[in-house]
Image (cartoon, rainbow, N blue to C red):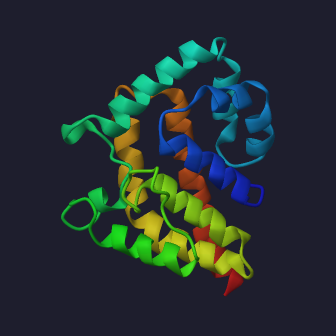
Amino acid sequence: MKEVSPELIRFLSNAFARELDLATIAACYDGVADELLHGAAGTDQLIQEMKTWSNAQETQRRLAISYGSVFLAGGREAAPLYASAWQGNGTLMSTPHYRMLSLLKQAGKEVANSYSEPADHLAIMLEYLAICLEGHHAAPDAAQFASSDISPWYRGFSKKVHRHSESDPFYLSLVKITEAVVEDLKTSIVKVE
């Protein structure tokens, strides 16, 4: 697997943040995502899926339906994108949310007012991971964050997405790639120490 890049992490973050907009889909059509994804673990299926997209508006509609039914649908069927939903008693805006607020503050960052999601949303956690990778001596920090803050809940989340009948190949691939990235970073703890 090629080295995990902040750009790849940001692509994943943006894809999980909300339904894809036409500009992001256009970037996928133009091959921008291919370049970013090439060589990363699990990306071949995603690249092939994006090559089947023939109409940007139809793709956006299909992905929005899948995003909503997999991540946002109420009840037990949804796979919520929040660490709080998977840890402790499953109450949103619990310990993982406050931990992320603290980590972001320490990095001189904050959740944008225009983004009305708790700080432990997967997209925000991945953005923080990208920040860790960009910093001086970033690998141990990124590895530690992936190991202690994402990994403990991500596997349950991944299994739920894979069991969900409405999961689109695009989101299934994103989940697999993110899991591979987290696992790769976790193994780098051993290499660094």
Of the pair 171 and 100, the residue shown nearer to us: 100
Q: Nearer the viewer, residue 32 or 153?
A: 32
Q: Residue 103: horizontal and vertical position, in percent?
A: 49, 76
139, above or below 167, in the image: below
Rendering quarter of residue 6: bottom right
Q: Quadrant of the C terminus?
A: bottom right
The residue that appears at 63% across and 12% down in the rendered structure is: 55
Give residue 29's quadrant in the image: top right
Residue at image x 28%, y 56%? 85
Q: Is 187 placed above or below 40 here? A: below
Q: Position of residue 32 (x, y in %)?
A: 78, 36
Q: Nearer the viewer, residue 114 or 132?
A: 114
The structure residue drawn at horizontal position 64% and vertical position 72%, both measured from the top left corner, is 132
Residue lying at the far front of the rendered structure: 113
3 in relation to 160, above or below:
below
Residue 139, how many percent across, how many down? 69, 75
Query: On the picture, is 22 further left or further right than 122?
Result: right
Question: Going by the image, does 159 lie left or right of 173?
Answer: left
**Numbered disc total:** 0
At horizontal 75% and vertical 80% (from top left) the residue drawn is 136
Check the picture and name the quadrant holding the N terminus: bottom right
Vertically, is 32 above or below 138? above
- Can you give x and y, in whole percent of width and height, for residue 7 in the image? 72, 53
| Quadrant assignment, res 143 | bottom right
Residue 18 lies left or right of residue 135; in this view the side is left
Left or right: residue 51 versus residue 165 is: right
